[in-house]
Image: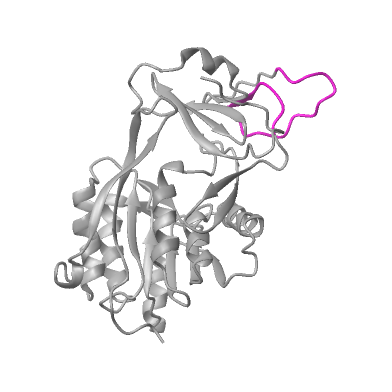
Amino acid sequence: MAIPLDPSSPGDDTATLIDFGRGRRLERLAGVLVDRPLPQARLPRSLPGLWAESRLTYTGGPEVESRISAGEQAPLLPRGWRQFGPLPDPWRVAIPLHATTLHLEVRPAASGQTGLFLEQSPQWTWLERVTSRGARILSLFAHSGAATLALAAAGAEVVHVDASRQAIGLARRNAEASGLATAPIRFVCEDARVFVQRELRRGSRYDGVVLDPPSWGHGPKGQAFAIDRDLPPLLEELAGLIPAPAAGPLLLSCHSAGWTASRLAEALAIVAGGRGRAGGTGQGITSGPLTCTDASGRSLEFGAHARRGPQPGRRVP
């Protein structure tokens, strides 16, 4: 299988899962092969000979190794990454949605993340397609901002909340690169529950919400978040911010063990039903896995999602 690797090739700005197996994944990000861990990828690799061509590998350790040519200056990478050749500058990938293309920065982190979550791209396409112009949407645990930008591309007013200042900066750069620098997006660096509780006290209302909580994390002031403990009360609080029936999209996704698609659907019904009551107007929720397909046509599951589209009803004034 011929796979172009030259980052200077015209149009080679895509992001693709190329192969997986033996606990790792191989992605092509704007022409660069990136090799990093993925514990659930237990199958044999389909393209074993291609892995040696990776330019960037994450080991999780402090090793520093390079095959950069003499005279080239290596970018500063977090510890745990090994570079084996030049990287694009700027390094961005194009993610086509329904009517818009997002341009997202590849940002290797010490955790092994790249700032990209390719398994979420169908959700971003759905958000752009179903969101109404002028809808007021809350985007929680918003990270590098792809969901926020999909909403903004549809004409929504978005409040983007993340606990990491670095992630907020990345989301701002992604907005600019995607031609959405002037879109009505409010960026907030705050703990999700602290922000929601403050909005409740203010009497704020939203048409919908998108959230992708981590298994665990910390707010900017050290507030601990654990999904099993903190997600259910957060959803109860969100029900007070979103009048039922929600006039905007509702989307809940995660990558946490034990949070299956059916469990996420039951959890999202708390918000869809309004005032913390499950059921009722919560009908119409659909759910399923978050998946990616590699170059050999094999599908790999990364997590799960539950969602419901906008419902007829009065919009938030």
Q: What is the quadrant of residue 86 in the picture? A: top right
Q: Please indicate, yes or no, whether residue 207 appears anywhere in the rendered image.
A: yes
Left or right: 33 in relation to 249: right
Observer-nearest of 165 and 288? 288
Picture residue at 82% right of the left edge, 19% below the top: 70
Q: Is residue 36 magenta?
A: no
Query: Please, is residue 314 above or below residue 43 in the view?
Result: below
Q: What secondary structure do most residues of the magenta stretch adopt?
A: loop
Residue extent of the magenta highlight: 67-87
Picture residue at 23% right of the left edge, 45% below the top: 260
Colour convention: one colour
Observer-nearest of 31 and 254? 31
Instruction: Pinpoint residue 51: horizontal percent, then vertical percent.
Output: 52, 17
Instruction: Pinpoint residue 180: horizontal percent, then vertical percent.
Output: 61, 64
Observer-nearest of 210 and 128? 128
Query: Please, is residue 242 above or below residue 231 in the view?
Result: below
